[in-house]
Image: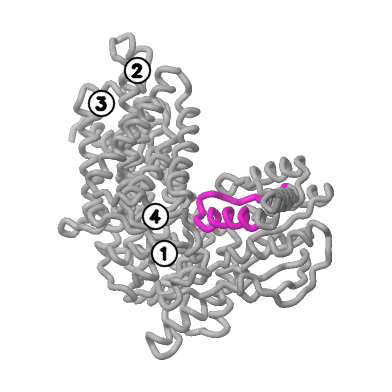
Amino acid sequence: MTIIQKKETLKWILDNIAWFILLAMLTIFSFTVKGFAQWPIYRNILYHSVFVGILAIAEAICILSKEMDLSVESVLALSAVVTAYLAGIGLDASGLHLNGPTTLIIVLIMGAIIGLFNSYFIVRMKINSFIVTLAGYLIFRAIGLIITKGHGVVNISKDIVAVARTNIGPIPLMVIILLVIYVIFSLFLSKTQFGRFIYFVGDNREASYNAGIKTDRVLTIVFIMSGVLSALAGWLLAARTNGSSPSLGQGILFEAMAAVVIGGVSLQGGVGKLSGVFAGAVILSSISTVINIVNINPYYMNIIRGAMIIIAVLLDAIIRKIRPKLI
Amino acid sequence: MKRKLIISLLSILFVATTVMGGIAADKGLVYYLSPNQFDEMQTAASKMVESAVERAGYTCRTLVAGNEDSNLQMNQLENAITQNPKAIIVAAVDGNAIVGGVEQAKAAGIPVIVFDRVISETKVDFTSVAGCKRIGIMAAHEIANLLKEKYGEVRGTILDIMGDPGDSYTTLIEEGLRETMENEYPNVQIETKIAYGWEATTAANIADDYLLAHPDTDLIFPHSDHMTVATASVLQTKGLQKNEILLVSTAGMPSGLQLIRDGWLKATVEQPVSAQAEGIAMFLDDIIEGKKIELGPYEVMEIPAEIIEQPYGLELRISGSVINAENVDNPIFWGNQVGD
């Protein structure tokens, strides 16, 4: 192997460090945790990473463009509520009993409108995205609470629930949906001109504008994509829980942010790959799963979860720091 | 002449009724400080407290502490004090954090009534609680009955899914469950997990993972019905039949009652929210006027209750009920009372 080849190999390893952390964790858990080393556990890890995984794409695209979307969690919750409200049979449902495809179209349009709403204030009114989406974080979940008067809605259309309960071979349909979305968005970011514009805008907005890139248009579409992806995650979450409850998805924003950071997306914008984000989401899901199956005092769970996230991020940070010296 | 007399009498009656009604509805302002708006039970509790207080002749103003924000609740309490209300009813986010505010209210001569969540670090004027520990004890006995039905003796393994550990509702249930099991049913193994923030998907994921590593689990006990709905969905996804793994819950939410009707949930121990609210209304005048309230047994909405002296003041303790397939449609349960 030539020096150049060695450098390329090392660069590839460092670029995909989240995957190696994931592999190391899964290996350690498989050999040390009783009952871990079985396909259904790995299947669960993937299944449970679906919602965080999709939200993490939404967040990653925003961060790549050097913006932030804090409203993703509330859009997810609102989408789950709207889905349950339109397709549920409970006391607080609409009574319309709409089917899966119709509710999906409605919530995706709703997500797009929310994205447009956010982008209007960010792009046109030049208000910081942190502030605008923080307001959205508060507003959109509250709208969901108003719709169902703060009650849960159970028993939604069977065709929606079926999405959560169908397997294609040994793999849940939800996981396939997640993988397809990752592949599509990874290709979109890496292979299309518009995807590259997102990186350019995140790396240097002024230079991108001077180079003729319509930065406002790029950011508007970024926020619309974020809204649509969050709404899709909410629809899938309603399928998973056969309805919605007022606290559904609470705290998932922080998991999505953690997945993005662990996955190597720079908070400074313009750097990072969705494959790393996917690994980040699966790392978080693996930690939760191992905590769920081992017998430990439940009060220590969040300490362990937090410590493992810090270890993963620290490891990633150390390697990224030594990377320029090695290459 | 006769007609004029009748009209006059009716007019007097109308005016008198209106004036009396006006007086009845004008006894003054009472604040209710609710801890959150994400918990279905708290949403119902707000409506029930408002309704009970207004039936007692007061105007009720509800303030919600966002999502269990103790600092926000403290601010709300301080703002409420400035309005000089007749009383403040508090369902505390944090029973310790709010002590300073409670003492400010007392110093301003405003009675403080505690609803649902005990404030034990200072003296309050009245406390109306279900006795969450009692709910845990009742759940333990119900679980024991179900395991005995299954095995002929009380033995087995339980996955116990607590809600947020910052909420005394779940920690007291846990205490009641654990104490009862350890003392009376030692052959029952309990494995406890936590669904932080009472988040339903977290509860579902816990059940999903745990059942893979421990397929011999007999029963799952999520501490609230909304988490049980998501857990039942996981059992269905796994292709399990009804009652193959038993489900017992607490709260008595509409969604829990529906799950009992559907045959997935064996029983839920109701928190008697409407009786707790009614209990406050029963004694509200006496509390505000500073009259002595007798200790001893009472009945609130036909539910046995008792007023006892606690270090923190008088406590109205109301028993919860076990709801199962036999009594699920009883209109006395709050889960059957909420709606439009």
Question: Looking at the image, is mark 3 or mark 2 earlier in the sequence?
Answer: 3
Q: Residue at x 38, y 77 (%)?
A: B218
Relative to B57, is A310 above or below?
Answer: above
Of labels 4 and 2, earlier in sequence is 4
Looking at the rendered image, the disc whose residue lies closer to the viewer, 1 or 2, is 1
Give the side of residue B103 with respect to residue A323, left or right: right
Would you say the residues marked 4 and 2 are in contact, meaning their CB atoms lie under 8 Å apart? no
CA gap, disc 3 and disc 2:
14 Å
Amino acid marked by disc 2:
Asp
The local crowd at label 4, few if under 14, some if 14 to 19, many if 20 or more residues have their Cα within 10 Å, is: many
Mark 4 or mark 3: which comes first in sequence? Answer: 4
Compute the Cα span from label 4 to label 2. Answer: 39 Å
User: Residue placed farthest to the bottom in the image?
Assistant: B152
Residue placed under numbered mark 3 in the picture: A195
Could you classify mark 2 by the number of other residues whose Cα lies within 10 Å: few (under 14), some (14-19), or many (20 or more)? some
Q: What residue is drawn where x is 42% and y is 30%?
A: A68
| Residue at mark 2: chain | A
Q: Residue at x 47, y 28 (%)?
A: A132
Residue at 47 percent across and 49 percent down: it is A149
* Residue type at numbered disc 1: Thr
Picture coordinates of residue A306, whole percent (x, y)? 48, 50
- Badge 1 sits on which subunit? B
Q: Report if residue A310 lies within the magenta region.
A: no
Q: Secondary structure at mark 1?
A: helix
Q: Which residues are magenta?
A: B29-52
Q: What amino acid is labelled 3 in the image?
A: Gly
Residue under numbered circle 4: A153
Q: Which residue is mark 1?
A: B228
**Label 1, label 4: how far apart the Cα atoms are:** 13 Å
Q: Position of residue A144 (x, y in %)?
A: 43, 44
Residue type, numbered disc 4: Val
